[in-house]
Image: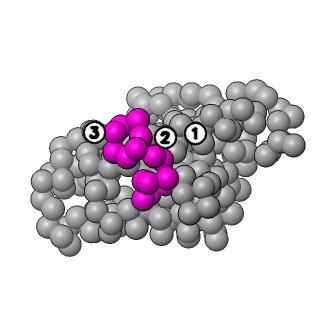
Amino acid sequence: MPYFDTSSLYLTIIQKKDKTMGRSRYKIYEPTHLHFITCTVQHWIPLFTRKESVEILLESFRYLQKTDNLKLYAYVILENHLHIVAQSDDIGQSMAKFKRHTARELIKLLQRENVKTILDQLSFYKKAHKTDRDYQVWQEGIQPKRIQTDAMMISKIKYTHHNPVKRGYVDEASHWRYSSARDYEGG
């Protein structure tokens, strides 16, 4: 039995040019379907090396589980990016809320802790068209890929959980603190 509806197996994402800003926007055409999503910190800055910064992400996921019906099937948080397998009532909107809220809270944390080096980097690598803010935490986009089959679901969950092992941080996926790999092994 499949984890999800596999009746429509067509591409869910198109790239649409925003002519006014000269940048790409992604539209998710099946926003309630399961997706594999990657979010990356601007210029791969290692922002999630402390428990406090990771807790901001986890808190946001918990909030979206209540408000947006977010379902996390797998996740991993590394020092400068995260991968999730998730779905919600509108995954595009949920991820926009996630990135907006976490960016605001992460900047507050960095300012409170006076982490000037990272704040300077987030300011330096900010996109020129982001004139309404001093810092940019996340790279634009979420690189969503719709999960279309059970095999793809298993592959994306394995990829997500194996990421810290591949990078040499741990020997077993379940040893990584900020990952759902433990949940899959009953931890």
Bounds of the magenta segment: 164-179
Place of residue 161 in the rendered image (x, y in percent of width and height, measured from the top left): 52, 45
Q: Is residue 38 visible?
A: no
- 118 or 104, nearer to the observer: 118
Could you tell whether 42 is left or right of 123 in the image?
right
Q: Earlier in the sequence, mark 2 or mark 3?
A: 3
Q: Residues within 10 Å of mark 1 (few under 14, many from 20)?
A: some
Q: How many marks?
A: 3
The residue that appears at 87% across and 43% down in the rendered structure is 1
Query: Helix, strand, or loop for circle 2?
Result: helix
Q: Earlier in the sequence, mark 1 or mark 3?
A: 3
Q: Residues within 10 Å of mark 3 (few under 14, many from 20)?
A: some
Q: Residue furthest front?
A: 171
Question: Which residue is label 1 attached to?
Answer: 158
Question: Which residue is label 3 attached to?
Answer: 43
Query: Helix, strand, or loop for circle 1?
Result: helix
Residue 111 is covered by the magenta coloring: no
Residues at discs 2 and 1 in contact (Cβ within 8 Å) = yes
For discs 2 and 3, the disc positioned in front in the rendered view: 2
Question: Which residue is label 2 attached to?
Answer: 162
